[in-house]
Image (tube, helix red, strand yellow):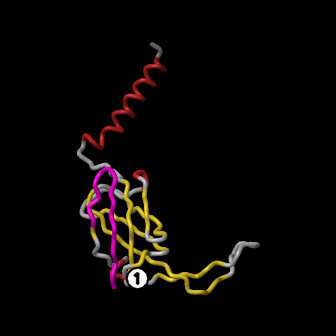
């Protein structure tokens, strides 16, 4: 076997073992899960909003967010929240009736929206949920 072939085999084996190293060291690798559900505000479906899941209490992973349209949201597994406990934030956007000029030439004006929820539903949220592997159906009924 040539020295170049030996080097390439060693490199492949080394990279493969390096990829397995986090599991061997006991490091947690984030595992996302699919999630979907309904969000209501004062018993009405949220017309336009955002839901954000953020891992807490040592759960590895990154925040995941989805658009809420007509009360429904959905995240596929690849884009979903990490398995484990997550903080949940809600943002509801309401049209103000105002528009601003688009910065792009030839584009329609942009409708201005405002966030209507108090901080206790988003930046200061105490909502927590447990995400399990597989699919999760999580419905949220928000009240003032």
In terms of depth relative to the viewer, which is nearer, 41 or 33? 41
* Location of residue 12 in the rendering, given as x and y in whole percent from the top left corner: 42, 29
Residue 141 painted magenta: yes
Give the left or right position of residue 132, taking residue 81 as reference: left
x 51%, y 81%: residue? 94
x 33%, y 71%: residue? 140
Give residue 104's quadrant in the image: bottom right
Give the left or right position of residue 43, taking residue 132 as reference: right
x 34%, y 65%: residue? 54
Q: Residue furthest right?
A: 106
Element type where label 1 sits in the image? loop
Q: Look at the picture and state if 111 lies above or below 19.
A: below
Q: Which residues lie in the magenta part?
A: 129-144
x 54%, y 81%: residue? 113
* Location of residue 118 in the rendering, given as x and y in whole percent from the top left corner: 38, 84
Indicate the quadrant containing the C terminus: top left, top right, bottom left or bottom right: bottom left
Q: Which residue is mark 1?
A: 117
Q: Look at the picture and state if 29 lies above or below 99.
A: above
In terms of depth relative to the viewer, which is nearer, 63 or 138? 138
Residue 80 painted magenta: no
């Amino acid at each position: 076997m040539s020295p170049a072939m030996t080097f390439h085999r060693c490199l492949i084996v080394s990279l493969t073992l390096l990829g397995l190293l986090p599991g061997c060291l006991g490091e947690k690798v984030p595992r996302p899960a699919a999630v979907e559900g309904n969000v209501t505000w004062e018993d009405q479906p949220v017309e336009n909003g955002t839901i954000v899941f953020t891992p807490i209490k040592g759960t590895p992973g990154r925040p995941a967010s989805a658009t809420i349209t007509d009360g429904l949201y959905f995240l596929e597994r690849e884009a979903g929240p990490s398995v484990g406990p997550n903080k949940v934030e809600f943002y509801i956007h309401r049209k103000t009736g105002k528009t601003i000029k688009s910065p792009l030439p030839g584009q329609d004006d942009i409708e201005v929206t405002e966030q209507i929820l108090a901080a206790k539903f988003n930046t200061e949220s105490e909502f927590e949920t447990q995400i399990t592997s597989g699919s999760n159906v999580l419905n949220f009924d928000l009240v003032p």
